[in-house]
Amino acid sequence: MLGGLWGSKVSTVSASDLVTLLKQDPKPLVLDVRTPGEFAHGHVPGARLVPLGQLGRHLAELPRDREIVTVCRSGHRALMAARQLARAGFSVRNLTGGMLAWTGPTAKD
């Protein structure tokens, strides 16, 4: 019952493990669900920006053949996005601690 109230259980990945995953082939798609302004201040290199409020409109554009890692500032919005993606059948994990925990390089573009 609580699963229905709180959403699907989503796997997580640590920042250090994501750094390693991004060096592998195929690497996961990092999906940043923050605002454009937050994204512009720094993000995981190669991340795709889709703000949480727009995610539903972009599901058809996301890959189903590789894992998606959701990212936000602290992890809360990314967890909501990961639950939505999991319900839609995507292979997804949430970055534990979000960008506050990110230990790899940061891009600004």
Image (tube, helix red, strand yellow):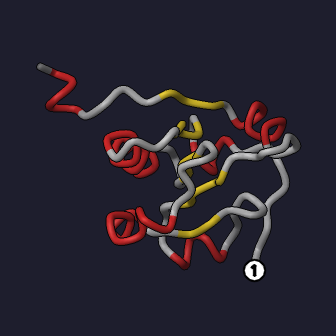
Name the spot of residue 5 as percent of width and height, x first: 14, 31
- In the rendered image, the vertical position of residue 8 relative to residue 40, given as above or below: above
- Is residue 76 in view from this perspective? no
Disc 1 is placed on an element classified as: loop
Q: Residue furthest top?
A: 1
Left/right of residue 44 with respect to residue 5 in the rendered view:
right
Residue at 65% across, 53% down: 29
Confirm whether residue 9 shows in the render: yes
User: Which quadrant holds the C terminus?
Assistant: bottom right
Front one among 87 and 13: 87
Counting from the top left corner in percent of width and height, residue 108 is at 76, 74
Q: Is residue 91 left or right of residue 41?
A: left
Task: Examine the rendered structure and indicate whether residue 71 appears above or below residue 56.
Answer: above
Residue furthest out toward the front: 65
Dot 1: within a 10 Å radius of its alpha carbon, few (fewer than 14), some, or many (20 or more) residues?
few
Identify the residue at image location x=62%, y=66%.
48
Residue that badge 1 annotates: 109
64 above or below 97?
A: below
Residue 45: image x %, image y %? 78, 62
Quadrant of image for the N terminus = top left
Q: Is residue 23 above or below residue 61?
A: above
Task: State the residue in front, 74 or 92.
Answer: 92
Amino acid under disc 1 = Asp
